[in-house]
Amino acid sequence: MISVLVRYQELALKGKNRPWFQRHLVQHLQRALAGLGVREVRVPMGRIELVLSDAASTGEVRERLKYVFGVANFSLATRVTPDVDAIIAGILRDLPKERPASFRVKVRRADAQFPMPSPEMERRIGGPVAEATGWTVDLRHPAMTIGVEVLPGQAFYHFGKEPGPGGLPTGTSGRIVALMSGGIDSPVAAYRMMRRGCRATLIHFHSYPFLSRASQDKARQLATRLARYQLSLKLLLVPFGEIQRQVTMTVPSALRVVVYRRLMLRIADRVAHHDGAHALVTGDVVGQVASQTLENLAVVGHGIARPILRPLVGMDKGEIINEAIRLGTYDISIQPDEDCCTLFTPRHPVTRARRDEIVAAEAALPVDAFIDTALREAHRERISAGVPGSEESAAASRSDVGAVIKLTVGAGSDHDTSAD
Ligand code: ATP
Ligand code: MG
């Protein structure tokens, strides 16, 4: 019988909140893996154990775990009685077919009562493995590590760890509204905050029918990528072209970019209000373009009630691009589109906007009416993860997960353990 042993790191630091964080993570794991043959979820001492049925597809389970924030790393593991001979017998039976360049045994004892010290156990287990296989032992740089974890009343062995995405479980930091253009930066910015446990609603401003629908298609594709991390997310497509047109009628051209950004933020702030979101997120980077000087960022954020989080603010473009490539958003972002920023935008925007001139320029605009109209005309879509079977898993997680998956919380589950 095979299990997935999930380890979390930062959760372990959260003291009294830890059971709450753990519950979020367990719930998310149940949803993410619904339909894949998870028979039972156990919570043995600082770990989460997902007991798989014989029919479970371990490949798909591993793939999905890469998108569950809060998972530091995980192992496909076998549970045995905490007895050295039983552990040795199990390991010898399940050894991987391929010969590693070298190996070692690493024992972690979370059970202080267990009679044998870890180094002695490592020798006791490693000896028979080396003898049976002829494999070379390398304690310092092993190509493969046979892991043994001894907990009260149970033990696990496994043949290596795989990295998870890290971060905090989805939802544990509350909600955010992320402003997402079709560009490279803002999807990465949204991802960064999602990884910190924020549940994101995405808002995209487009200039259809003045421009094509291309930017909306990109926004949907980007949203689908990001949805893998929270299984489903809300995308708002907000028509912005008419607002821009009206801005051009009274606002001097050099100031328009700043005024557009302020209007976007005010609309997003209203969405956040309705959504119960605590912050707005943008992909701004200091100095990257004219609208992102420190002066302009200050003016852009003036008067916005919620904090504006800019997780990329100090990054280089190259670093952001690398992260976008890793995320799989880069190829979508570089597709040509007709971003609303290209509409009615001057060639020489102001780089040091003054607050009073912006406020004066806005005085003639019906800002509240803009916000009301934008929200009335916004198109709301629910984007699902776009992984095979995710529709069924979403359905399964709604209907029968509680019945199918039994959650067993083991004794001592509040004990502190690290994820390594
Ligand atoms: P990005 O690569 O994310 O488009 P950028 O470097 O092009 O960013 P700007 O065009 O100045 O920068 O936009 C700054 C931020 O404003 C974006 O990162 C995004 O958060 C928000 N933003 C800009 N245009 C839009 C849009 N059409 N819809 C939603 N948000 C937008
Ligand atoms: Mg852009």
Image (tube, helix red, strand yellow):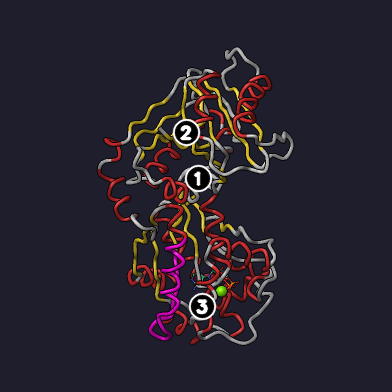
What residue do we see at 37% from left, 61% from top? 383
- SS at mark 3? loop
Q: Which x, y percent locates residue 337?
A: 49, 81
* Quadrant in which residue 133 is drawn: top right
- 381 vs 168, left or right, is left
Ligand 1 quadrant assignment? bottom right
Residue 87 or residue 331, whichever sits in front: 87
| Disc 1 versus disc 3: nearer the observer | 3
- Label 1 SS: loop
Identity, as a three-letter code, of the amino acid under mark 1: Ser
**Amino acid at pointer 2:** Ile
Which mark's residue is nearer the viewer, 2 or 3? 2
Image mark for residue 335: 3
Q: Read off the residue under disc 2.
A: 48
Q: Quadrant of the C terminus?
A: top right
Image location (x, y in percent) of residue 275: 39, 54
Left or right position of 199 against 158: left
Magenta region: 203-225
The quarter of the picture where residue 110 lies is top right
Q: Measured along the vertical axis of the image, is residue 228 above or below residue 236?
A: above
Mark found first going from the N terminus, 1 or 3: 1
Q: Which residue occupies 33% across, 69% down?
A: 376
Of the numbered discs 2 and 1, the one sitting upstream in the chain is 2
- Label 1 CA crowd tier, 10 Å (few <14, some 14–19, many 20+): some
Q: Is residue 137 left or right of residue 72?
A: right
Q: CA distance from mark 1 to mark 3?
A: 32 Å
In the image, which disc is placed on residue 173? Answer: 1
Q: Picture coordinates of residue 316 (x, y %)?
A: 70, 65
| Gap between marks 2 and 1 measured at Cα | 21 Å
For the residues labelled 2 and 3, the Cα–Cα distance comes to 41 Å
